[in-house]
Image (tube, rainbow, N blue to C red):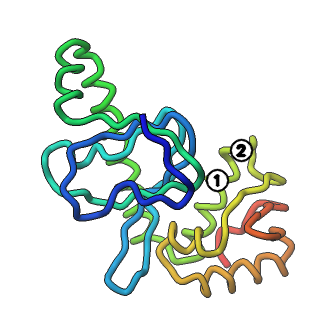
């Protein structure tokens, strides 16, 4: 078991790895970056979820992972997992189901990036994030900065700021210090 402070980089994209991190407490962000420092967020993961599974085949890490808040993880090596799977074979199916879910999520994200403009991706993200917290999402406060949103939908922070300002003027949302509240359903097109 290991404890990590907020902002700790626990996995570096491109490194060789053979460990799986099971999150007991906290929140972690998986992301990729280019040579210019631009980032895209693949997802955020909390208690009960795992990260690091993509290098259990002996390959390199496909993403970096950083803590978004103080976190506690159990770090399992490939050898430990193999022994556990030999004793508890049904765990292999749980791990496989998680990898399949992640593959589906990546496929959906690629589809959204390719088939939607920036506003369409913003609308989908805000709708999904707020719907997770409330029945229809309206009136729910989501904690996302403009940079967080830009990293998740693959555009610049400036573009997000312009769209959010326009949506605020239109009475669709309210913003304050990294928090966004949907006041009514966002229009299909903007």
Image quadrant where one finds the N terminus? top left
Q: Which residue is mark 1?
A: 129
Q: Position of residue 148 (x, y in %)?
A: 58, 68
Q: Is residue 175 above or below residue 68?
A: below
Furthest-left residue in view? 58
Q: Is residue 143 left or right of residue 84?
A: right
Q: Are marks 2 and 1 in contact (CB under 8 Å)?
A: yes
Q: Nearer the viewer, residue 177 or 74?
A: 74
**Quadrant hosting residue 68:** bottom right
Q: Position of residue 81 (x, y in %)?
A: 23, 28
Number of numbered discs:
2
Q: Nearer the viewer, residue 122 or 83?
A: 83
Residue drawn 84% across the image and 81% down it: 169
Q: Position of residue 118 (x, y in %)?
A: 54, 77
| Circle 1: element type | helix
Q: Is residue 28 left or right of residue 88?
A: right
| Circle 2: element type | helix
- The disc label shown at residue 177, or none: none
Residue drawn 84% across the image and 53% down it: 139
Q: Which residue is mark 2?
A: 133
- For marks 2 and 1, give the CA distance: 7 Å
Q: Is residue 134 above or below residue 95?
A: below
Q: Is residue 76 left or right of residue 164?
A: left
Q: Position of residue 48 (x, y in %)?
A: 49, 32
Residue drawn 40% across the image and 50% down it: 105
Q: Is residue 104 above or below residue 9?
A: above
């Amino acid at each position: 078991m290991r404890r990590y402070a907020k902002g700790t980089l626990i996995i570096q994209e491109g490194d060789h790895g053979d460990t799986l991190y099971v999150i007991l407490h906290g929140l972690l962000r998986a992301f990729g970056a280019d040579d210019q420092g631009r980032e895209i967020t693949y997802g955020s993961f909390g208690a009960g979820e795992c990260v690091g599974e993509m290098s259990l085949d002996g390959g390199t890490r496909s993403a970096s992972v950083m803590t978004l808040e103080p976190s506690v993880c159990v770090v399992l090596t490939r050898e430990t997992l193999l022994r556990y799977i030999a004793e508890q074979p049904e765990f292999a199916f749980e791990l496989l189901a998680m990898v399949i879910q992640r593959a589906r999520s990546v496929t959906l994200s690629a589809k959204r990036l390719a088939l939607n403009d920036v506003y369409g991706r913003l609308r989908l993200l805000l709708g999904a994030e707020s719907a997770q917290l409330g029945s229809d999402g309206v009136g729910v406060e989501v904690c996302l900065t403009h940079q967080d949103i830009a990293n998740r939908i693959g555009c610049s922070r400036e573009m997000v700021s312009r769209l959010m300002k326009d949506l605020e003027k239109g009475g669709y949302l309210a913003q304050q210090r990294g928090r966004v509240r949907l006041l009514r359903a966002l229009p299909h097109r903007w």
